Amino acid sequence: MKTCKIILYDEPTVPEIQLERLKKFLKETFSIEIETRDSIFQCTNENISKKIASCRIFNLKKPFEKHVPSTEDIQLEKENKDMSEKEEMILYDGFEFHNAITELIPINENNMDILHIIFTNKLTCTFDENDFRYHARAIIGSNPAIISTTGIIEAPAKPKQYYLDVMTNFSKNRVEEIKKKYKGEFLEYHDSRISEITEGYLLQAIMYYETGEAFCEHRDCRLFNAHWQKDLFFSQLENKRFCKKHQEILDELKNPSH
């Protein structure tokens, strides 16, 4: 591996991540140093908060448009509240967001030997030129890599029938009833399954940094890019294995001399 150390940055509003558990998982998977740290956003100053606020998306059907954030928006970034408490979801351009938080990485640790993986409750998105709209993403691969806990919940789609039920019974009370009807079939905020599922996203972030490829097209691989919650559950909770190709790559990363 070109990486000799991985640093995981916590997201305090999502204790279900269980950072120490993930640290243990990575230590058992790779023979490298793993360090955990508090949220990187605790270090944000006025300038960084302004840059993060300027990453917000206002038009889902147009590529990113730069804007000057309001004082209120900047203050909200400094507070970094629990996203599950917000009625209106705030979207961020994933690449702009990455550029903004890269400045938070200490200069002496900004090198190829150290991979920084940052957990955030902010919903990162990327613009797709194929259908000309933004899509929610659970992971933005690079260094630092970004794993959006909100993206893990919101990006993979819920069951089709769930959306049909919501569209025909759209009221706050009815939506809550429909959620209860499908409970367990998709992730919810503060879901106890988040930590185990996050293992797969950590592996995708590391694989992307090491090889340039993060995802697998096979559903029975932990690197599968799940577009549906049911597929996410299968690859990360039920199957929890790699396809032959990616198992060989993983073995080579762990034991480069063999």
Image (spheres, rainbow, N blue to C red):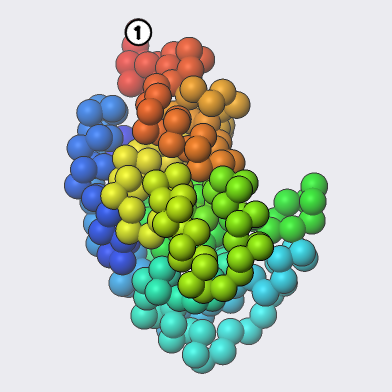
**Placement of 258 over or under 78, stated as above or below:** above
**Is any part of residue 206 visible from this angle?**
no
**Placement of 123 over or under 215, stated as above or below:** below
The picture places residue 166, in percent across and down from the top left corner, at 60, 61
Could you say which quadrant of the image residue 44 lies in? bottom left
Image side of residue 43 versus residue 142, left or right = left
The picture places residue 49, in percent across and down from the top left corner, at 46, 78
**Residue with the most extreme top position:** 258
Q: Residues within 10 Å of mark 1 (few under 14, many from 20)?
A: few
**Is any part of residue 159 visible from this angle?**
yes
Q: Quadrant of the C terminus?
A: top left
Could you say which quadrant of the image residue 165 lies in? bottom right
Number of numbered discs on residues: 1
The picture places residue 174, in percent across and down from the top left corner, at 52, 68
Looking at this view, is 142 or 125 the one in front? 125
Q: Give the residue type that dot 1 points to.
A: His
Q: Which residue is mark 1?
A: 258
Looking at this view, is 149 or 127 the one in front? 149
**Placement of 183 over or under 23, stated as above or below:** below
Residue at x 43% of width, y 41% of height: 201
Residue at x 29% of width, y 50% of height: 192
The picture places residue 230, in percent across and down from the top left corner, at 50, 38
Residue at x 56% of width, y 45% of height: 159
Q: Secondary structure under badge 1?
A: loop
Image side of residue 160 versus residue 71, left or right = right
Q: Quadrant of the N terminus?
A: top left
